[in-house]
Amino acid sequence: MQPPTRTTTGVEALTEAVRARVEQRAAELAEQGRSLELGDVDALADRMVAALPTVHPLDQPLGPFYDTTGLVAWLGISRQALFDRVRRGTVLACRTADGHLVYPSLQFGRNGVVRPGVQDAVGAFVRRGVDGWSIGAWLTTPSTVFDGHSAVDYLVVHRSSSTSVARVATAAANDAAQWAA
């Protein structure tokens, strides 16, 4: 097997590594007078690919994300202060499968302040015990309540006017109450 070069992509390197290992296994079996029986090659390929990271449906509308270290550095606050904001529902955090918190960048303005309306919505849901991924989905899913826009897009289109902030806050409070009921 050749070492990856600068022009070799990760996919090409992985494909070559798998090919080399399968050929090595086939050669070892041949030395024993046996053959490599792969069975349904498509099913085997599916099982192998299942071990690779996947694209989550929420990655596109919610991402990119800050991690705790990056957000603490950008905001210039302590980890404890950030976790307190999450606990109070003034910052949206989503817990990954491996237990880490990530923070959707869509909630922050250029100055690091959580956008008006988003903070109201996050708080309404957090107080009702709704998880971060569900809150993120609510913020990014188009709705007739927001004239076919998502809550975040509605706030952007209306430049976070007091009317648009109130509309998002009211809708979030109403939905949070129904979800928790």
Image (spheres, rainbow, N blue to C red):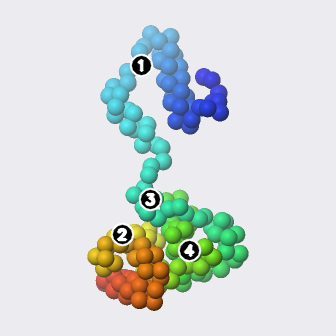
Q: How far apart, in angstroms, are the residues tagged by discs 4 and 2?
A: 18 Å
Q: Which mark sits nearer the N-terminus, 2 or 3?
A: 3
Q: Quadrant of residue 4?
A: top right
Compare marks 1 and 4 and give the one earlier in the sequence: 1
User: Is 61 placed left or right of 71 in the picture?
Assistant: left
Label ID, residue 141: 2
Is residue 132 positioned above or below 58 on the image?
A: below
Q: Earlier in the sequence, mark 4 or mark 3?
A: 3
Taking the spot 60% from the left edge, 64% from the top edge, the residue there is: 67
Q: Residue at x 42, y 73 (%)?
A: 153
Q: Quadrant of residue 139?
A: bottom left
How far, Cα to Cα, is label 2 from label 3? 12 Å
Check disc 1 and give the amino acid type: Leu
Identify the element where label 3 is drawn: helix
Q: Which mark is residue 48?
A: none
Percent coordinates x, y for residue 97 in the rendering:
49, 59
Which comes before the other along the chain, label 4 or label 2? 4
Q: Please name the residue that numbered disc 1 is placed on.
A: 36
Tell me, yes or no, whether the two marked residues, 4 and 2, touch with CB atoms within 8 Å: no
As drawn, the label of residue 60 is 3
